[in-house]
Amino acid sequence: MAILITVLIFGLMVLVHELGHFLLAKKNGIGVVEFSIGMGPRLFSVERGGTKYSLKILPLGGSCAMKGELEDVEGEDSFQNKSVGKRIAVVVAGPIFNFFLAFVGAVILVNGVGFDEPEILQVTEGSPAQEAGLETGDVITRYNGKKIYLGRDLELLEYLYGVPDTVELEILRDGEKQVLTFAPNSETRYMLGFHYYETEEPAEISSVELHQPLYEAGVQPGDVITSVNGEPVSSGVELGEYFDAHPMDGSPMTLTYERRGTEKEIQVTPEMAKSTDLGFFYNYYREKSSNPLEVLKYSALEVRYSIVNVYNGLKMLVTGQAGVEDMSGPVGIANMVETNYEAAKSQGTFITWMTMLNLLILLSANLGIVNLLPIPGLDGGRLLFLLVELVRGKRVKEETEGVIHFVGMMLMLALVLYVTFHDFTKFF
């Protein structure tokens, strides 16, 4: 089922993306030779109005092949014979349509399950946060200078950057803004770098911290720990009791965990790290709104959250905080879909589809952002050449641009193959 959902998500994103190019091309009088979904050999095709519409065998990718797109072709309906402005509009339409798809999905999601207002749910008794004046019901609007719109905004900042030695919160209380500053409690101890659900249910991992021991060992959220150092663990409560009775001291540990019915065993060594407690719990559970304007506002914020997520991932790649091995290709995405599907299906059909819709929003925004990067072979690469033409007043030589795009596409293909291979080794 998860594979089918992955194919449907990819298919819809590609269809909408190529539809953006197609509609703007038609609007600007550019001939479209073929509009296709998928790659490889055609399953079937039909020709209408001078355009061949095709469905191809591999459910990845698609194309909107325009007349004169890659070479000079005579005729008023040739891509290259149109003004720079019209060509730019056609190129950026694909990514823009992906953002629009994400927004439509967000409207359905927010209308169906609501949004997570960053409200303080509980303040730890005697904590620095309480002493600074933080109260239950306060709504966080800024965290160390960064704007907070959703509870997940703060959760993402914690995940990416941890908790600093000094925290500055801007809060909204009874309609008035206040700024609170405090130094949260922290301790340095041996850790594996993960969180789990401490319930009577199986000890399922909820999150894994970047570049910590379990992350480096390939453990993922959704995995279920079944034993530690040979001692069986049947629930999150039992796992907590085990760690209480056996504090980590830096000695190597043997963990057994289950992933999709397959049991795996790893050797992992805890590392000394700082653990910081903010001293409060905030909301990241969704609550519905009956206000249409509020639904639209938070739908836009859903898309913003997805874009910020993608931006932070790209930033980490550029700065070296993450490597190519941390990227996910089609296999990694299919695994993510399956993990979320399995976690959500016990909550019913509605929640399952809302969870899948949430993934569509993230992935569609991802596709829009990535396609706008100035990389040859992508829409952003083509846009870069068009902007150069706009500034220079003349095109870059056709042969030069063609070679650069070809090299870019080959490098992108090599990257996809590498990431896909790494996904197989990581997940299977």
Image: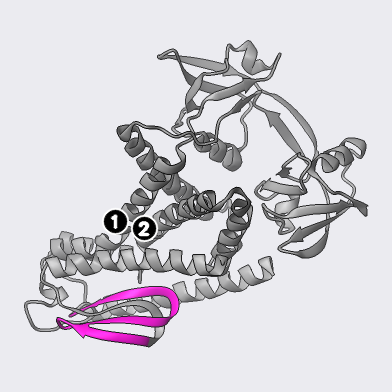
* Label of residue 355 in the image: none
**Is the residue under label 1 in contact with that under label 2 (CB below 8 Å)?**
yes
Q: Which residue is mark 1?
A: 96
Distance between mark 2 and mark 1 Cα atoms: 7 Å
Total residue callouts: 2
Asked which secondary structure carries label 2, the reply is helix
- For residue 33, say whether it is visible: yes
Q: Nearer the viewer, residue 161 or 62?
A: 62
Tell me which numbered mark, 2 or 1, is placed earlier along the sequence: 1
Vertical position of residue 30 compared to residue 342: above or below: below
Q: Is residue 206 left or right of residue 255?
A: left
Q: Nearer the viewer, residue 5 or 188?
A: 5
- Three-letter residue code for mark 2: Gly
Q: Where does residue 199 sit, x and y in percent of width and height?
A: 76, 39
Asked which secondary structure carries label 1, the reply is helix
Q: Which residue is mark 2?
A: 368
Look at 86% across and 40% down and name the residue there: 243
- For residue 248, say whether it is visible: no
Q: Which residues are magenta?
A: 43-67
